[in-house]
Image (cartoon, rainbow, N blue to C red):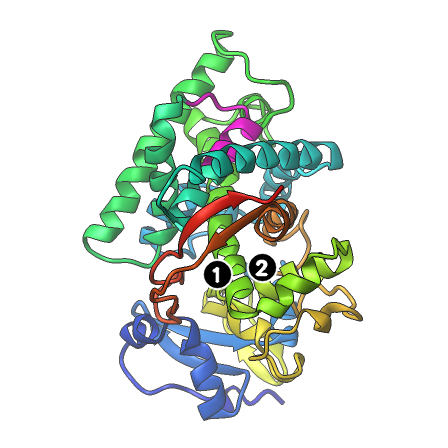
Amino acid sequence: MPHESNMPKEDGIDNSLSLMREGYMYISNRRHSFNSNIFKTRLLGKEAICMVGKDAAEVFYDNEKFIRHNVAPNRAIQTLFGKNSVQTLDGEELQHRKAMLMSMMTSDKLEKLMTIAHKQWELALDKWSQMEQVVFYEEVQQIMCRTAYEWAGVPVEADKVEKLAKDLGALYESAGAAGPNHWLGRNARNRIEKSLEKLIVSVRNDELHPPEHSALHTFSWHRDLNGKLLEPAAAAVEVINILRPIVAISIYISFMALALHHFPNEKEKLKTNDEQYAHMFIQEIRRFYPFFPFAMAKVKEDFVWNDYTFEKGTFTLLDLYGTNQDPDFWENPSEFKPERFINWEENPFNFIPQGGGDYYIGHRCAGEWVTINIMKVSLDFLVNKMDYDVPEQDLSFSLVSMPSIPKSKIMIENVKRNV
């Protein structure tokens, strides 16, 4: 018999402030205090279930048990996701929209992406060699912005890139913020969506001709399950779902630079151009450092799991960061050790920095391979194609701020091309 009453439960009328104060560690802290991978609490005025770990991820990404429609808080919709985006869909509608996004992830398109990223890194290296000091995170945002716009087939004026990079960055930097910072992200989304809507209308009016099979071309002509073209606003939101995640890779690239600084022996290992070790290093960056804190869903219908009852409509959080740091699966998870991936059997539920489950029928990030491929290009530049100094600065990063970014944004100096 189920014993739902035995599920650990956090005291308090609403614990949203505790979540904001503790950030990435909110669920993990209670996991340790309750000695349980699952507990109940109250968040945003609602009863909520929080879970962590491989088994929890497996049930969380079961489309028969959880849905995403009307789950994300409005502040996340207005900044991070966008209205009626793929992240908020379920069932056939989700699969149909996801297929559109996954059509961008073919090997030839990813190869083109890497070529563009390489070119943009080359241009940035020329620029940085003329600068006294480089704010690495902000400069990489611009590299990623130029790469994203070119790959997506979206025209952009050179003098607008810096502003666009900041606007796209604001979408994920403000997702959990309140007050002025939230409105920075909200206003940025409005600007980007409106500009893209105009471009999509121009494509349909035969006034603009983006490269065939680019995101702008493909999404402009995509039809929904009823055979109708997406509304320009909906198509614009999905183009942003190509642009924004690529700019967000600047967080991972910054953590790569941080790891190379903190673990110089890793840089020596990477200089051998061993592709397998480079891949393991990138995976360890994605496991070790914080990115997305958690995923959100709600229970589709009543069900019982591990003798606990999940009631229809219950808001549920899966701890992504905590699952990647799970000591039940990862040996010494607080140790930076790329070699842990040597014999790792790829699993869609135990390593979930960008969500878990299936790419095509679930909510795992469609752009995960975009992330990995761009990180490979970026790592090659950091290790083999440039030299630079890291002056004294505050390189700490917070597990409270979501997303977490090194405090100094990583300042580098004396950048030189490594001939």
- Residue holding disc 2: 355
Q: CA distance from mark 2 to mark 1?
A: 8 Å
Relative horizontal placement of residue 39, taking residue 75 as reference (left or right) = right
Q: Give me the residue at 59% from left, 71% from top.
A: 324
Confirm whether the magenta stretch covers residue 27: no
Q: Give me the residue at 53% from left, 50% from top.
A: 387
Q: Are marks 2 and 1 in contact (CB under 8 Å)?
A: yes
Q: Give me the residue at 27% from left, 73% from top.
A: 17
Label 1 secondary element: loop
The residue lying toward the viewer, choosing from 72 and 182, is 182
Label 2 secondary element: loop
Identity, as a three-letter code, of the amino acid under mark 2: Gly
Could you tell me if residue 62 is visible in this image?
no
Relative horizontal placement of residue 10, taking residue 223 as reference (left or right) = left
Q: Position of residue 345 (x, y in %)?
A: 79, 68
Q: Position of residue 289 (x, y in %)?
A: 51, 67
Could you tell me if residue 99 is visible in this image?
yes
Secondary structure mostly seen in magenta is helix
Category of crowding for the residue at label 1, using alpha-carbon neighbours closer than 10 angstroms: few (below 14), some (14–19), many (at least 20)? some
Confirm whether the magenta stretch covers residue 152: yes
User: Residue lying furthest left in this view?
Assistant: 180
